[in-house]
Image: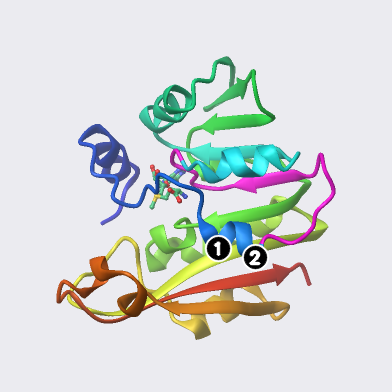
Amino acid sequence: MITNDFWLERWQTGRIGFHQEGINPKLVDYWPILAKQSKVLVPLCGKTNDMIWLAEQGYQVTGVELSSLAIIEFIGDNDLTYETLQQGNLKIHTVNELPIRLIEGDYFDFNEQGFDACYDRAAMVAMPQNVREKYVQHTLQRLSQKAFVLLITLQYQGDKKGPPFSVAEKEVIQLWGTDIKKLASENLMETNPDYRDGSYTSFEESVWHIDQN
Ligand SMILES: C[S@@+](CC[C@H](N)C(=O)[O-])C[C@H]1O[C@@H](n2cnc3c(N)ncnc32)[C@H](O)[C@@H]1O
C-alpha cells in the first residue's frame, strides 16, 4: 500500500529516481501563454526545478509536498532562503528570492483555491488507483473557473508496478473531464535507453491540456 510513510521513507533513503536535474522539456514546450503574476499550483512537487522555471516566467508558484527533506533539498540545491509560518497541519515556506511558496504537508489538507493553472508531472501517476479520483477532484477544486492543467501521464506494460503507476488514456479522460486534449505522446523505449532494461514492453509518456468545464 502506498502511504504517506512510503514517500517519507523514499526521501529519507534517497530513493528519488523520479527527480530530474534539469527542467522538464515538455513543460517548456507545452506550457501555454499565461499572464505574469498568475497563480500556478504544483501538487506533489518534490524538489522539482520546474518550479524555478515557472517562477522565472513571472508566475506565483505554490508547490505542495509531504516531505520536509524535499523542501530542504530544493532550498539548498538552489541557494535559496525562506521564512516559515505554521497554518493548521501545514507549514507554509515562503522563498525570499523567487515568487515560490512551498507548502509542507498532506496535499489533501491543502484547501486554498483560485489557482490560474496547475502543472502535474509525476503527481497523478504517483497516486494509487483508489485515491486517484479524490486527487483529481481535490486538484480541480483548487482552480479558478478559467484555469487549465498541464498534465504528464505514463502508460506502460511490463513487470514493474508503480509508483509511477500506468494510467490508461481512458481513465485520464474519465477523471479530468471532457475538455481535455492530448498534446503529445512519446514512446520512451525508443528515445531513452533507461526504459530498455527488460522491465517494460511499452512505455508511453503523454502530455495533456485540460480546461475547466
Ligand atoms: C513521484 S514524486 C514527483 C515529484 C515531482 N512532481 C517531480 O516531478 O519530481 C511524488 C511526490 O509526491 C509527494 N507526495 C506523495 N503523497 C503526497 C501527499 N499526500 N501530499 C503531499 N505530497 C505527497 C512525495 O513525497 C513525492 O515527493
**Above or below: residue 48 compared with residue 143:** above
**Above or below: residue 157 compared with residue 28:** below
Image spot of residue 103 (x, y percent) = 56, 32
Q: As shown in the figure, which amino acid type bears the numbered disc 2?
A: Tyr
Q: Magenta span covers which residues?
A: 31-47
Residue at x 67%, y 70% (from the top left corner):
209
Would you say the residues marked 1 and 2 are in contact, meaning their CB atoms lie under 8 Å apart? Answer: yes
**Above or below: residue 100 compared with residue 150:** above
Q: Marks 1 and 2, how far apart in space?
A: 6 Å
Horizontal arrangement in the rendering, residue 136 relative to residue 162 (left or right):
right
**Magenta run includes residue 32:** yes
- Please indicate, yes or no, whether residue 138 appears anywhere in the rendered image: no
Q: Mark 1 points at which residue?
A: 26
In the depicted view, which residue is nearer to us: 160 or 128?
160
Q: What element carries label 2?
A: helix
Q: Is the magenta stretch mostly helix, strand or loop?
A: loop
Q: What element carries label 1?
A: helix
- Please indicate, yes or no, whether residue 192 appears anywhere in the rendered image: yes
Horizontal arrangement in the rendering, residue 160 relative to residue 171 (left or right):
left
In the depicted view, which residue is nearer to us: 195 or 160?
195
Q: Mark 2 points at which residue?
A: 30
